[in-house]
Image (cartoon, helix red, strand yellow):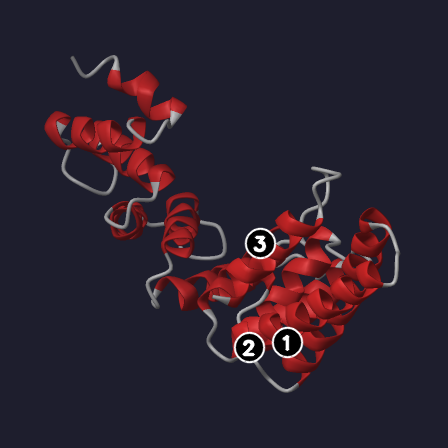
C-alpha cells in the first residue's frame, strides 16, 4: 500500500535521525501518496548518484515531499473531496506542515461536515462547543454532534449523551443521555461505558442496577479508564 510505502521510504532514507515523522493518516487518496513518494524516491536516488551525501539528500527530499503533499491535498480538498477536507482541517488544527489556523480548520471542517463526513461533523460540534475558530454556540454544537451520532460515530454519540445529561444545547434528559451513552458504549467507547455505568449506579435515566453498573464499569476499567476502576472497587 502507498501509505506503508511512504512510511518505508522515510525509515529507509533517514537512519540519521529519529525525530522526523510524516503522518500518513492525512491522506485518504492513496494514489496521491504513491505519486508523491515515487517522485521523492527517484530524486533521492539521483542525488546520491551525483555525490550528494545521504543526510543532505534526505532532508532536501523530505522538504519537497511535505511542500508538495500539502499542495496536492489542498487541490483535492478544493475539488470537494470530503475526506481530504477533514484531513486538511486536522493539519490546520495541529499546524502540521502548515501555519496553525483554527479559522482555516473550521472552514474545511464545515465543508466536509456539510457533505456528511461524520468525523468532521463531530469535530465541528466541538469547535462550536468551546468557541474554537468560530463563535461559541452550545445549540449548534449539539446539532452537529447529533448529525454525526446518527451516522454511528461513537465519539459523537458520547458527546451527545453528555449534552443531554447536562442540558447543553438541548433540553436536559437523563433518558436520552443514557440512551446515547449506551450506543457509544456498545461500540467500545470507554468514556461512554463509564458514564453508562454511572447511570446504572445512580439510576439516572435508567432503572438502577448494580449488576449492569458493574458490567459497564468493568468494560471501561479493562480499557484503563481510571474513573471506572475507582467505582469498580465499590461493586464488590
* Of residues 65 and 149, the one drawn nearer to the viewer in this rendering: 65
Q: Residue at x 60, y 84 (%)?
A: 80
* Of residues 129 and 190, the one drawn nearer to the viewer in this rendering: 190
Residue 113 position within the rendered picture, expressed as x and y whole percent measured from the top left: 53, 72
Check disc 3 and report the residue beneath it.
8
Residue 79 position within the rendered picture, expressed as x and y whole percent measured from the top left: 64, 87
Q: Residue at x 22, y 33 (%)?
A: 216
Confirm or deny contact between disc 1 and disc 3 (CB under 8 A): no
Q: Is residue 236 above or below residue 13?
A: above
Q: Is residue 12 visible?
A: yes
Q: Is residue 207 above or below residue 143?
A: above
Check disc 2 and report the residue beneath it.
31
Confirm or deny contact between disc 1 and disc 2 (CB under 8 A): yes
User: At numbered mark 3, what does the secondary structure look like: helix, strand or loop?
Assistant: helix
Residue 56 position within the rendered picture, expressed as x and y whole percent measured from the top left: 86, 51
Q: Is residue 206 above or below residue 94?
A: above
Residue 65 position within the rendered picture, expressed as x and y whole percent measured from the top left: 75, 64
Asked if residue 62 lies left or right of residue 236, the reply is right
Check disc 1 and report the residue beneath it.
35
C-alpha span from label 1 to label 3: 15 Å
Marked residue nearer the N-terminal end (1 or 3) = 3
* Of residues 109 and 131, the one drawn nearer to the viewer in this rendering: 109
Asked if residue 98 lies left or right of residue 197, the reply is right
Q: Is residue 29 visible?
A: no
Q: Is residue 41 above or below residue 54?
A: below
Residue at the bottom extreme, as displayed: 79
Badge 3: few (under 14), some or many (20 or more) residues near its Cα, within 10 Å? Answer: few
C-alpha span from label 1 to label 2: 6 Å
User: At numbered mark 1, what does the secondary structure look like: helix, strand or loop?
Assistant: helix
Amino acid at each position: 500500500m502507498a501509505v506503508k510505502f511512504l512510511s518505508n521510504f522515510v525509515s529507509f532514507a533517514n537512519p540519521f535521525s529519529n525525530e522526523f515523522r510524516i503522518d500518513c493518516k492525512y491522506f485518504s487518496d492513496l494514489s496521491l501518496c504513491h505519486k508523491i513518494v515515487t517522485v521523492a524516491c527517484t530524486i533521492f536516488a539521483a542525488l546520491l548518484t551525483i555525490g550528494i551525501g545521504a543526510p543532505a539528500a534526505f532532508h532536501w527530499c523530505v522538504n519537497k515531499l511535505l511542500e508538495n503533499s500539502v499542495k496536492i491535498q489542498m487541490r483535492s480538498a478544493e475539488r470537494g473531496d470530503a475526506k481530504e477536507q477533514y484531513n486538511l482541517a486536522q493539519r490546520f488544527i495541529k499546524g502540521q506542515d502548515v501555519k496553525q489556523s483554527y479559522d482555516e480548520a473550521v472552514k474545511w471542517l464545515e465543508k466536509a461536515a456539510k457533505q456528511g463526513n461524520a468525523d468532521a461533523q463531530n469535530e465541528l460540534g466541538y469547535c462550536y462547543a468551546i468557541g474554537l475558530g468560530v463563535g461559541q454556540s452550545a445549540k449548534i454544537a449539539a446539532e452537529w454532534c447529533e448529525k454525526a451520532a446518527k451516522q454511528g460515530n461513537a465519539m459523537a454519540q458520547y458527546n451527545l449523551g453528555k449534552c443531554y445529561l447536562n442540558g447543553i444545547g438541548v433540553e436536559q434528559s437523563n433518558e436520552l443521555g443514557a440512551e446515547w451513552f449506551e450506543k457509544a458504549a456498545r461500540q467500545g467507547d470507554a468514556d461512554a461505558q463509564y458514564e453508562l455505568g454511572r447511570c446504572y449506579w445512580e439510576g439516572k435515566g435508567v432503572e438502577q442496577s448494580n449488576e449492569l453498573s458493574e458490567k459497564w464499569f468493568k468494560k471501561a476499567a479493562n480499557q484503563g479508564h481510571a474513573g471506572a476502576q475507582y467505582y469498580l472497587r465499590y461493586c464488590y
